[in-house]
Amino acid sequence: MPASPSTARAINDRLALRLLQQEGPLTAGQLKQLTGLSRPTVSDLVERLTVSGLIRVVGESGEQRRGPNARLYGIAADRAHLAALDVRTGGVLVLVSDLVGRVLAEVAVPIDAGSGTGPAVEQAVAAVEEAARKAGPDAWAGLHTVGIGAPGLVDPATGDLRDSSGLPAWHRSLVAALQWRLPKARVTVENETNLAALAEQREGAARDRDTFVLLWLGHGVGAAVVLDGRLRRGASGGTGEIGFLPVPGTGSLPSATDCDGGFHALAGAAAIVALAREHGLPA
């Protein structure tokens, strides 16, 4: 069944915006060549995106060229702001960027594990506000999306972090707190390993791979699975949670919320440090 005109326009607009994001400013002719769309269709989408304020003329394509065909169109980067949070057990790092990914401000805040859930959440929210206000006078109130990367399982049904032993309780309260302070923004949380896989798929070592597994080795161990170009989370959100796998040699079994008896107990940072010390290596 062919797409409706409105659906086709939305698809074309998204394609053009993605190209402008990846390639930088382009002329209408270059958009026609890269998208394979007809000249009238490209002309319509350029006008539509310009009127909506999503793109604007940012220059001309050559010193000797003038006129409509030479106009370079680029994404209106200051139309909205985005915030990214790297949430760790001992603190949070906040970056605020424009729509083309240019980092405008950065704030890092250590958070004491013993400070309690409420104060810890307030510190994290304050860090987001500080970074946004550094990025621009209207950035805090105008944040479009807040993305949070955190360790732990994300429930695919609710989009919330699940309770896991060893992870601070304030992690699970952060989304609700930010959504309350920023009711117009989209606030989402994703497992940090899954985000790393998406980054590698888009910009890194997996750009030419539709199917791959990313192995995460750090304080804990984990993995992210991409099949046929799509990140696979599983019915429970635990596809890549290899730290919970029961393995010989741990002396116990992992539980639904505790991976100490699983593969994590053999390959996590604490186990590697202990093994190094047993062999007289500095750790």
Image: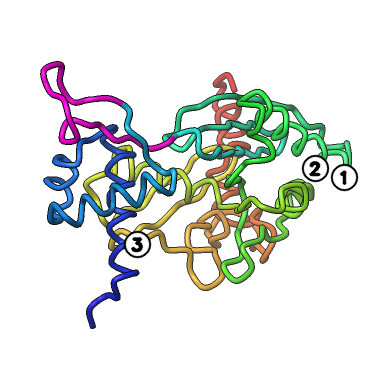
At mark 3, the secondary structure is helix
At mark 2, the secondary structure is helix
Residue nearer the viewer, 35 or 227: 35
Q: Residue at x 82, y 32 (%)?
A: 112
Residue nearer the viewer, 30 or 147: 30
Q: Residue at x 21, y 51 (%)?
A: 42
Q: In which image quadrant can residue 158 be found? A: bottom right
Other-residue count near label 3 (Cα within 10 Å), few / some / many at <14 / 14–19 / ≥20: few
> Can you name the residue that lies furthest to the top here?
63
> Can you name the residue that lies furthest to the bottom here?
1
Name the spot of residue 219 as percent of width and height, x first: 59, 38
Q: Residue at x 43, y 49 (%)?
A: 52
Q: State if disc 2 and disc 1 touch (CB < 8 Å).
A: yes
Determine if the magenta segment contains residue 15.
no
**Is the residue 205 above or below the residue 104 in the image?**
below
**Is the residue 151 above or below the residue 133 in the image?**
below
Q: Amino acid at mark 3?
A: Ala
**Is the residue 234 above or below the residue 260 in the image?**
below
- Quadrant occupied by the C terminus: top right
Among the two numbered marks 3 and 2 on one chain, the one whose residue lies closer to the N terminus: 3
In the picture of the structure, the residue carrying the numbered disc 1 is 118
Q: Residue at x 63, y 37 (%)?
A: 270
Q: Amino acid at mark 1?
A: Gly
Q: Amino acid at mark 2?
A: Val
Determine if the magenta segment contains residue 71.
yes
Residue nearer the viewer, 218 or 17: 17
The span from disc 3 to disc 1 (Cα, nearest Å) is: 42 Å
Q: Single out the mark in the foreground, 3 or 1.
A: 3
In the picture of the structure, the residue carrying the numbered disc 3 is 10
Other-residue count near label 2 (Cα within 10 Å), few / some / many at <14 / 14–19 / ≥20: many
Q: Which residues are magenta?
A: 59-76
In the picture of the structure, the residue carrying the numbered disc 2 is 121
